[in-house]
Image (cartoon, rainbow, N blue to C red):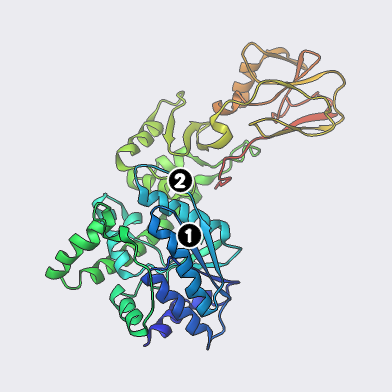
């Protein structure tokens, strides 16, 4: 079967996408992909094809690449968009450039649009070996997926089953022109060292090393899929429903999760945490054990890259964004007929006819008391304990003070307004950055 036909087969699932965008670096692989797509479009009904070139500006020679890409695209009749990105300095220039590149792609993709990237089988083998040397687990050793969500669209790698030699043979036979990135020869970079110094030695001893490694990545991908199915089943059982329905944060029932074997606990948590934060390395998982095994009256916290996992009310709660900082200071509410935005703490409104007087919103400092019909004046701390409000919520739970007197505690039945029920204090808490929950 020809290269064109195999490519068309690899793209069959996305034939009806609104648009195909080629991640066009100007290098060999993306040049072959672009030319093959243009040929296919002449005889097949395909989505509109365009190209995106990311200019990192990391080396002087790269300044000539947009011009080259524009010339090739003009010859092929393909629209090209050149995006300039800023690469942050850090311990890994490769990773920083990749992050900047994919962030730019995310911004360009519309709903269900496809970004086509030209990584091939040799790239997959390099990825597997690189991650293996870094001690990756099954998820990492699955290598690059053939497709995955990217922003509002989808990233697709149709060349993952194609060896680089085949792409190069096609490019030479067709007389295609491409740019060579001089940094690809820099063996101080990990991937280049594997490509130039390690793989030739492996292939001299095992000629099918690249093919075998790529096949191992496929097996790992299947294993990762099965682990995902197991995690989803375990998480479904641990999701439950918190009695605080207004607290829309990602959370899990601790007991349900703790009843699993340690390996299944970690598997479920990896799956659950993956869209929320970079996953911890093996040594850092001791933080989960400390959190799980802490005394029942403790308030342990497991700190991760983009937030914290906290235990409260028999549940695990994921906190990030505004939840990692204390809310702003007290403020007045000049027009209680309208919702009040609380800086760093969501929104507040009064359902019903607001009370008369000067209204203030305060946060717990200690020593507050609330007058309750039939019970007299009760200490706020005791009331919060009786209501079993999670500890991390208590310091940011809005308190309504009218003419200097505490009148209501937001969202707590029986404490959120007068017994007659002519008004109630309703708080919409802040969400996490990712706004994801189970």
**Place of residue 186 in the rendered image (x, y in percent of width and height, measured from the top left):** 26, 56
Per the image, label 2 sits on a secondary structure element best described as: helix
Total numbered labels placed on residues in the image: 2
Which of the numbered marks, if any, corresponds to residue 273? Answer: 2
User: On the image, which quarter does residue 10 sit in?
Assistant: bottom left
Q: Which residue is drawn at 17% across and 66% down?
A: 200
Q: Residue at x 47, y 39 (%)?
A: 306
**Place of residue 219 in the rendered image (x, y in percent of width and height, measured from the top left):** 31, 66
Residue identified by numbered label 1: 54
Q: How crowded is the residue under tag 1: few (<14 C-alpha within 10 Å), some, or many (20+)?
A: many
Q: How crowded is the residue under tag 2: few (<14 C-alpha within 10 Å), some, or many (20+)?
A: some
The N terminus lies in quadrant: bottom left
Q: Which residue is drawn at 35% across and 70% down?
A: 120
**Place of residue 46 in the rendered image (x, y in percent of width and height, measured from the top left):** 55, 80
- Residue 314 visible in the current orientation: yes
In this rendered view, identify the residue nearer to me: 414 or 160. Answer: 160
Mark 1 near mark 2, Cβ–Cβ under 8 Å? no
Q: Which residue is drawn at 77% across and 13% down?
A: 405
User: Disc 1 vs disc 2: which is toward the camera?
Assistant: 1
Left or right, residue 408 beside residue 192: right
Left or right, residue 208 beside residue 14: left
- Residue 219 visible in the current orientation: no
Q: What is the distance, in whole Å, between disc 1 and disc 2 at their CAs?
A: 30 Å
In this rendered view, identify the residue nearer to me: 79 or 154. Answer: 79
**Place of residue 246 in the rendered image (x, y in percent of width and height, measured from the top left):** 66, 38
């Amino acid at each position: 079967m020809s290269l064109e036909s195999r490519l068309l087969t690899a793209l069959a699932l996305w034939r009806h996408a609104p648009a195909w965008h080629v991640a066009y670096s100007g290098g060999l692989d993306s040049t072959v992909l672009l030319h093959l797509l243009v040929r296919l479009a002449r005889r097949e009904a395909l989505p509109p094809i365009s190209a995106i070139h990311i200019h990192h500006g990391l080396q002087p020679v790269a300044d000539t690449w947009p011009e080259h890409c524009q010339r090739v695209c003009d010859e092929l009749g393909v629209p090209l968009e050149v995006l300039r990105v800023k690469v942050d300095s850090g311990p890994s220039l490769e990773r920083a450039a990749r992050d900047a590149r994919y962030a730019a792609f995310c911004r360009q993709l519309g709903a269900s649009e496809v970004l086509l990237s030209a990584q091939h089988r040799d790239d997959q083998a390099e990825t597997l070996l690189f991650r293996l040397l870094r001690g990756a687990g099954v998820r990492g050793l699955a290598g690059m997926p053939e497709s995955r969500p990217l922003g509002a669209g989808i990233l697709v790698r149709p060349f993952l089953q194609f060896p680089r030699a085949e792409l190069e043979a096609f490019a030479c036979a067709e007389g295609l022109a491409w740019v060579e990135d001089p940094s690809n020869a820099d063996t101080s970079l990990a991937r280049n060292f594997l490509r130039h110094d390690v793989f030739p030695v492996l292939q001299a001893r095992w000629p099918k090393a690249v093919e075998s490694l790529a096949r191992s990545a496929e097996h790992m991908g299947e294993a990762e899929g099965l682990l995902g199915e197991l995690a989803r089943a375990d998480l479904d059982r641990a999701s439950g429903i918190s009695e605080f329905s207004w607290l829309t944060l990602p959370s899990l029932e601790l007991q349900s999760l703790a009843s699993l074997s340690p390996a299944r606990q970690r598997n479920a948590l990896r799956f659950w945490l993956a869209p929320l934060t970079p996953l911890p390395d093996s040594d850092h998982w001791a933080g989960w054990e400390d959190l799980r095994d802490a005394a029942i009256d403790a308030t342990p916290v497991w700190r991760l890259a983009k937030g914290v996992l906290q235990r409260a009310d028999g549940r695990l709660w994921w906190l990030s964004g505004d939840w990692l900082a204390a809310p702003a200071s007290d403020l007045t509410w000049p027009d209680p007929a309208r919702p009040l935005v609380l800086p760093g703490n969501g929104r507040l409104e009064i359902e019903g006819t607001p009370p008369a007087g000067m209204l203030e919103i305060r946060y717990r400092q200690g020593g507050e008391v609330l007058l309750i019909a039939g019970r007299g004046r009760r200490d706020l701390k005791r009331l919060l304990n009786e209501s079993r409000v999670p500890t991390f919520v208590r310091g940011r739970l809005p308190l309504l003070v009218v003419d200097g007197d505490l009148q209501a505690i937001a969202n707590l039945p029986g404490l959120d307004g007068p017994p007659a029920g002519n008004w109630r204090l309703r708080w919409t808490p802040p969400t996490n950055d990712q706004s994801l929950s189970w």
